[in-house]
Image (spheres, rainbow, N blue to C red):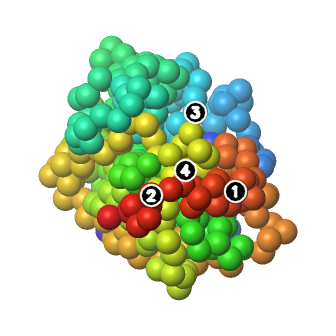
Amino acid sequence: MTSDIHLRVLLVEPRGALGAGLAIALARLGCRVTWFGRGQDATPTVPGLLPIVGDRRRLLDLRSIGGGSFDALVDFGCSEPDSPLALHQVFRGRVGLFIYLSTWRVYAGAGDSTGMAPPLPVGEDAPLRGGPRAKAEECLWGVRSAETYPVTVLRLASLYGPGVRFAREWHVVDRLRRGRRRIAIPWDGSQLLHRLYVDNAVHAIISVLDHPREVDGRVFNVGDSDVPTALRLVESIAQVSGCVITPVRLPTEWFDPCNPWAPPHPVVLDLHRLRARLGYQEPVAPAEGLARTVRWLWDLPEETVASVLAPYWQCFGAHDLAGEDAALERWDRRDGEGDARRPQ
C-alpha cells in the first residue's frame, strides 16, 4: 500500500496487539481510522485516530461517524453469529469492503481430540467444523450473494508477538526464568500449530485493503512461512534466551504439561492463495518475530505477568512446576531408558 492514501477505515472492536498495530500502521499510511471498541480495550495514541467507546449493542451510534460511510470495515471477529449481519444492516451501501477476521479454528479437525492426523496443508475450501465463527462467515456470504455486498474473510493462524496476551511462548520462558533447564515435551515433540507474527498479520490486512477488487468474495489463510514443531519451538526459545536445555520426552499419562503447541490434530494452513493473488510477503521473518516475542516476555516484571498475560492464565493457569519436576524425577528412575529420553 502506498503512503498518503487517505482511506477511511473503521475498526470494529479491535483487540490487543493486532488492533493497536493495525491502527498505528494505517495512520502512518495516511488513513483516517475510527476505533470502535469497549472501554477496556486500550486505544493507541495515534494522530488522527477517532476513538469511540461502545460495543455491538450500540452500532447505531456509528451512522453519523465519518460522514456515515467508510472505504473499509475491519471486524475483529465477534463470536456471535448474527453480529456481522447487524453490522451489514447498519452499513448497507456505505462501506467499500467488509473484512472479517476469522480463525484457523473454523476448520474441521482443528482442536479435535481424535488423535494425530497427517499434517496436510489446509486450503481455504476445506470443510469447516461449524461453531459461531463459521456461522458468522456463512452469514456474510449469504448477504454478499443476495446484495453484492463486498466481503472478504481472513482466517488467521495462531497469533504471537510482543503485546499478544495469549502468549504461548510463556510456557517455556517462565520455566527458563525460574532456572529450569530440563523441559518436558509431550511425546516426541513433533506436534504442529501454524503461527502468525502480529506484524505480519497487520501487513496481510493492509495488503487486502490495497486490493479490494481482487479479494472481494474470497477467503484467505494467513500464517507465517515457517511452521516449526513443538520441539523446535522450545529449543529456539531457549537459544534466544541464551539457555542450554535438555528436552525430555514425557508421556502425557505421567504428567500433562498442557503444552500450548501440542494440538491433538496438526494445524498447517495452505498459504498459496494469499501469496499468489496479492503477492504477499511477510515483512518479519518468523525467527526474528520469535526473538522479539521472547525478549518481551523475558523482561516482563513478575508482578505484572498475571495481568499482562491474563488470557494465557485463564486457559492454562499457573504452571505446576513442582508437579512437573516430580514427574521428571520419576521418569529418571525408570530402568533401561538411558539416552532414549533425549529427542532425536
- Inspect this view and state whether residue 343 appears: yes
Relative image position of residue 21 (x, y in whole percent): 54, 63
SS type, badge 3? loop
In percent of the image, x 51 and y 75: which residue is there? 245
Distance, label 1 to label 3, CA atoms, is 41 Å
Residue at the extreme front: 335
SS type, badge 1? helix
Nearer to us: label 2 or label 1: 2
Position of the C terminus, as image quadrant, is bottom left
Q: Indicate the quadrant where residue 47 lies.
A: bottom right
Which of the two residues, 313 or 161, is positioned nearer the viewer here? 313
- Mark 3: few/some/many CA within 10 Å (<14, 14-19, 20+): some
The correct choice, above or below, for 130 with respect to 11 in the image is: above
Nearer to us: label 1 or label 3: 1
Q: Which residue is mark 3?
A: 78
In percent of the image, x 46 and y 28: which residue is there? 113
Q: Which residue is mark 2?
A: 336
Nearer to us: label 2 or label 4: 2
The correct choice, above or below, for 24 with respect to 143 in the image is: below
Q: Amino acid at mark 1?
A: Ala
The correct choice, above or below, for 219 with respect to 268 in the image is: above
Q: Which residue is mark 1?
A: 326
Position of the N terminus, as image quadrant, is bottom left
Q: Which residue is mark 4?
A: 259
Distance, label 4 to label 3, CA atoms, is 27 Å
Which of the two residues, 217 or 266, is positioned nearer the viewer here? 266
Residue at the extreme left: 276
Pointer 4 and pointer 1: residues touching (CB < 8 Å)? Answer: no
Relative image position of residue 217 (x, y in whole percent): 27, 31
Relative image position of residue 266 (x, y in whole percent): 35, 41
